[in-house]
Image: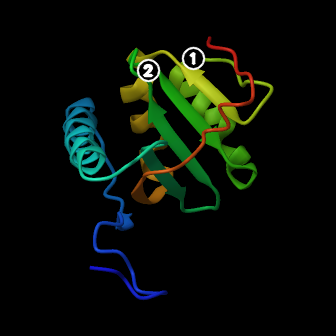
Amino acid sequence: MMHEEGEKNQDEPVERPWIVLKTTYDVEAWIDHQNRAIQQLINSSKASGWGICFSLGEGGDIFMHTTSEGDVLLDVTPEAEWVTPLIAAATQVEVPATQIWALPGDRLTQLVLGLSSLIASTRLVLDHSFNLKHKFKRH
């Protein structure tokens, strides 16, 4: 069945309001839920740049992707640069020279816990490039 132009695709991920996560258990349960949702989405589409977009209450977006090795890539939009000191403090990683961050996978829980009170909503993304053509340095 073809969709008319302008009609929203039923399989398109929706933006969801954020519920502040306060404990590492809450974050780990959220991560598990998101992993399952992403796997379903990947299996039912031709996703190439899948991940999660965090929309911040004070402005800007952070796109997050986990690599097959378990590392975390963040694309912090220019409007969200104000949050980079918090990302650095929560993950104990230096602020990179570009908007792309490469974090060890074991920092994901600290990242989400640190950002939790600043997030307004999230949505799954299917085709974000994460600026992979740009070089980034893993810390």
Residue 107: numbered disc: 2
Q: Depth check: give the residue in front, 34 or 55.
A: 34
Q: Depth check: give the residue in front, 133 or 97.
A: 133
Residue at (40, 14) in percent of width and height: 69
Given the current orientation, which residue lies at the most extreme right position?
97
Residue 92: numbered disc: 1
Q: Position of residue 89 (x, y in %)?
A: 59, 25
Q: Depth check: give the residue in front, 69 or 88.
A: 69
Secondary structure beneath label 1: loop
Query: What's the amino acid at mark 2?
Result: Arg
First in residue order: circle 2 vs circle 1: 1
| CA gap, disc 2 and disc 1 | 8 Å
Query: What's the amino acid at mark 1?
Result: Gln
Residue at (41, 86) in percent of width and height: 7
Locate residue 133 relative to residue 18 in the image: left or right.
right
Dot 2, how many residues are within 10 Å of its Cα: few (below 14), some (14-19), or many (20+)? some
Q: Are marks 2 and 1 in contact (CB under 8 Å)?
A: yes
Q: Position of residue 117 (x, y in %)?
A: 44, 50
